[in-house]
């Protein structure tokens, strides 16, 4: 049985001493194995994971390593469990926790900063100065589950209470896994100024974050909202999520089309979610003078940037990492109030035991996969939730 000093459990929510989790070996190599159920410390809880969505970043981590960092280095062969977009049920409380009770249904954000560095104190815990320094002699208490600490492709995970978002019963498990994606889009728009009502926004790249950026910008009152991409099925989904205009960059010049869609002036904001090599320079030409650009995608290569245009036109460039400044709470509120339907981007569900198939669907976009969710627990629970 699961008994640990200063950890509260409750009848009806029994926790095993050992759990099943996917463990990363060499690059690309995952095995489903037993490992000790983790123990929450001060201000932490144990979450029984009910559903977890796959993110492009998970595929990066599993195949290449960064931005995951375990014990100061690459995440391979360290019995590390990836996965970061999960939701579940609180089943044990660490010391000092009275904000949540056992049985609470929650979704999570990824980053619990150390809470003691300058950025954490500013609410920028996704840019914590102690990222990954959560081990050994330099343990700073930082967690980014699925990046620097064990994540959600597992039956249980430990979460700091600051990373929990309580869920309404009306939100399905699958939808709840998308709160962090919508929260990342919300953080981007927060950094651009937040009050975007009546302002024009272009989103480049209709991946999950781009599609959620369209939905969040629209819910915040931006007008017009323009989405650019290269796949018609994704652009169509952008229209369903609130885009006023979509631009297929294979068929027309994306910069011209975006400027045209806003009366030839260019837009006030660009949220860049494609990571494409020329995306920054295109964004610089899409915004009007004094406009702002948020870079939200991990680009694969360094890029030559037209600095003169940025200076000449007084353009602001922001890089964002993850879902800072409690943006997930604002995203959850929008979703709970049905201001947009995030479930449109959820396309497939597999059992946790079938994670390799789920990863393949996400990686190869089989059957137009966008967000692929894996569900833990008994087949019966999975079926019930799907009904
Ligand atoms: Zn993610
Ligand atoms: Zn910090």
Image (cartoon, rainbow, N blue to C red):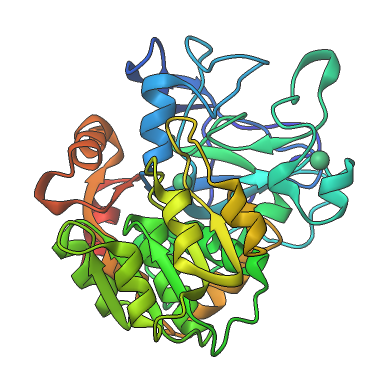
Q: Nearer the viewer, residue 119 or 134?
A: 119
Q: Quadrant of residue 142?
A: top right
Residue 111 drawn above or below residue 219: above
Residue 67 seen in this snapshot = yes
Residue 45 seen in this snapshot = no
Residue 306 appears left or right of 133? left
**Residue 344 appears at what percent x and percent y?**
27, 69
Q: Nearer the viewer, residue 148 or 86?
A: 148
Residue 212 drawn above or below residue 46: below
Residue 26 appears left or right of 190? left
Quadrant in which the N terminus is drawn: top right
Q: Nearer the viewer, residue 154 or 244?
A: 244
**Residue 169 appears at what percent x and percent y?**
46, 75
- Residue sticking out furthest to the left: 367
> What residue is at 59 percent from the left and 81 percent from the top?
196
Residue 241 appears left or right of 111? left
Residue 153 drawn above or below residue 118: above
Residue 222 appears left or right of 192? left
**Residue 206 appears at what percent x and percent y?**
31, 59
> What residue is at 32 percent from the left and 16 percent from the top?
29
> What residue is at 46 percent from the left and 51 percent from the top?
281
Quadrant in which the C terminus is drawn: bottom left
> What residue is at 26 percent from the left and 78 percent from the top?
239
């Amino acid at each position: 049985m699961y008994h640990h000093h200063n950890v509260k459990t409750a009848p009806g929510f029994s926790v095993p001493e050992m759990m099943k989790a996917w463990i990363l070996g060499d690059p690309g190599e995952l095995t489903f194995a037993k490992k000790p159920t983790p123990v929450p410390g001060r201000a932490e809880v144990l979450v029984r994971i009910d559903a977890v969505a796959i993110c492009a970043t998970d595929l990066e981590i599993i195949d290449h390593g960064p931005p995951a960092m375990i014990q100061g280095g690459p995440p391979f062969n360290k019995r590390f469990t990836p996965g970061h977009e999960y939701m579940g049920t609180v089943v044990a409380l660490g010391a000092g926790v009275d904000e949540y009770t056992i049985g609470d249904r929650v979704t999570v954000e990824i980053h619990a900063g150390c809470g003691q560095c300058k950025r954490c104190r500013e609410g920028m815990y996704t840019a914590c100065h102690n990222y990954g320094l959560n081990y050994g002699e330099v343990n700073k208490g930082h967690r980014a589950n699925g990046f620097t600490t064990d994540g959600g492709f597992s039956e249980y995970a430990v979460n700091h209470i600051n990373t929990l978002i309580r869920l309404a019963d009306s939100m399905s498990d699958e939808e709840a896994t998308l709160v962090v994606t919508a929260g990342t889009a919300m953080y981007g728009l927060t950094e651009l100024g937040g009050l975007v009502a009546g302002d024009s926004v272009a989103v480049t790249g209709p991946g999950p974050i781009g599609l959620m950026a369209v939905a969040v910008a629209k819910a915040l009152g931006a007008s017009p909202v323009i989405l650019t991409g290269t796949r018609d099925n994704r652009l169509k989904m952008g229209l369903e999520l609130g885009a006023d205009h979509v631009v297929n960059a294979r068929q027309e010049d994306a910069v011209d089309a975006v400027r045209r869609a806003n009366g030839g002036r260019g837009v006030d904001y660009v949220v860049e979610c494609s990571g494409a090599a020329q995306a920054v320079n295109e964004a610089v030409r899409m915004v009007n003078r004094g406009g702002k650009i948020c870079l939200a995608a991990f680009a694969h290569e360094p890029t030559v940037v037209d600095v003169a245009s940025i200076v000449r036109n007084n353009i602001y460039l922001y890089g964002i990492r993850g879902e800072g400044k409690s943006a997930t709470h604002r995203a959850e509120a929008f979703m709970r109030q049905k201001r947009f339907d995030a479930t449109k981007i959820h396309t497939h569900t597999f059992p946790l035991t079938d994670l390799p198939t789920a990863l393949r669907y996400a990686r190869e976009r089989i059957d137009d996969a966008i967000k692929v969710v894996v569900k833990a627990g008994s087949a019966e629970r999975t079926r019930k939730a799907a009904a």
